[in-house]
Amino acid sequence: MDVRTKCTSEEPLESLGQDLPAGSHRLLQFTNCRLVRGHQIIHEDLWVRDGRIVNPEPVFFDEQAKAHCRIDCGGAIIAPGYIDLQINGGYGVDFSYDTETIEEGVATVARGLVKSGVTSFCPTLVTSPNDSYHTILPRIPAEVPKGAGILGIHAEGPFINPQKKGAHPEHCIQTIDKGLSTLKDTYGSLERIKIITLAPEKVTDPEVIGQLVERGITVALGHSMASLSDGERAVQQGATLITHLFNAMLPFHHRDPGLVGLLASDAVPHGRTVYFGIISDGVHTHPAALRIAYRTHPQGLILVTDAISALGLEEGVHHIGQLPLQVKQGKAFIAGTETLCGSIAPMDECVRIFQKATDCSVVYAIEAATLHPAQCLKIDHQKGTLDFGSDADFILLDDQLRVLSTWIAGVCVHRTAK
Ligand code: ZN
């Protein structure tokens, strides 16, 4: 067997270990690095085989195996890959509107996202007509070669409150009036759905949330006028996530703090965590609001981009969707106006903005985009950590948390040009 023991970072990383005979179990050793593991940064090597992170001890002692390839990381931080639970599109693609070309659209975004360190995501559909769901959902690719993994769809709507519709089309908003069968009729199938954002006050059947959770769907509360007690009831029925905290919900009020109050509720069932997505793009959530959320309920905080189609596009005017968009100084406006039309900050930037705004530890900022979303979806045995046995989805970061390279299942899918 061709055994190379030293690979420099100058070598094309894409080919690392790929020259071994098919079927052999390539063992990669990432060295001269710091790992984000067990809520801290540790000086240890990372070992990867067959797309998984492996425990080196049994490999040395029981198998007497040596690395086929040793990769010098130049002192970089190795973190789990970022997980984005809410993203509407990017690179000129809008998942909700580019119905006919959805396969290519999802593939384009999946391959673009790896540049920002995202290794898995939930393509998010805003409130849409039933036909769109029926067309899009069965066509979402299960995986995209060299692209971020697809965890399932986040259906944001259509069971939301029209009074908090935000950019969702009002005529497509629905009410759950026949229990689970309303959801099946609307989406066509629940197969590919991982998260449903709904307004709890639009759910009259107390069984529905529990039935969705039983099917492995995460129920998120948002685009809602819910009082705190509406929110608590939904959480007791099984909801575990709040969608883009502070946005499209009642503002915090001391006599009824609304969904925001769930961060400090004493009616959450024992042992359960209420997670919340938060947009830290420097625009949609004030730094003080980020700090309030962080200090109140740190273990539930999940960074989401909520990015729109203009994510990843150059400065200038772009004709996508119904209105022309203009990208100016890293923000997206309706062309010719000062009206912001959505977030375009990539996840790595959200992590950096969040870390700076809250002065939290580097490890915590990373966990808010890795461990927490994985825990929320109950996939933390597989993703969101560098624990032994996890998928080898990880990123190399410099000390400013800039992405140096992105790896999925142990294969380099992106390296930032120097
Ligand atoms: Zn929204």
Image: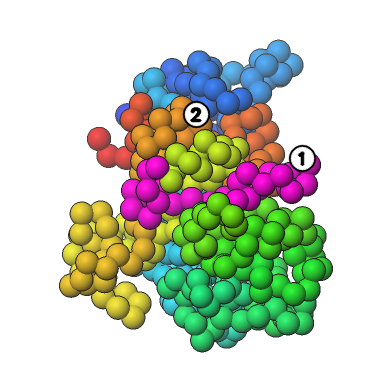
Q: Position of residue 46 (x, y in %)?
A: 54, 24
Q: How far across and down, in percent of the image, does residue 44 sit? A: 53, 17
Q: Quadrant of the C terminus?
A: top left
Please state which of residues 91 and 130 is positioned toward the viewer in this rendering: 130
- Which residue occupies the foreground of this view, 220 or 150? 220
Instruction: Kindly tell me whether residue 195 is visible in this rendering.
Output: no
Q: Which residues are magenta?
A: 259-288
Residue at mark 1 to residue at mark 2: CA–CA distance: 23 Å
Which quadrant would residue 137 be assigned to in this image? bottom right
Q: Callout 1 environment at 10 Å: few (<14), some (14 to 19), or many (20+)?
A: few
Q: Residue furthest top?
A: 61
Decide which of tag 1 and tag 2 comes sooner along the chain: 1
Q: Which residue is mark 2?
A: 363
Q: Residue 329 occupies which quadrant of the picture?
A: bottom left
Where does label 1 land, which residue?
271
- Left or right side of 167 for 150: right
The x, y position of residue 29, in whole percent, is 52, 23
Q: Which mark is residue 107?
A: none
| Image position of 29 with respect to 367: above or below | above
Q: Residue at x 55, y 43 (%)?
A: 301
- The quadrant of the picture occupied by the N terminus is top right
State whether residue 418 is above or below residue 267.
above
Identify the residue shown where x is 36% and y is 63%: 342
- Residue plotted at (64% across, 36% down): 390
Say how the picture is coloured.
rainbow
User: Which of label 1 and label 2 is nearer to you?
Assistant: 1
Q: Is residue 270 magenta?
A: yes
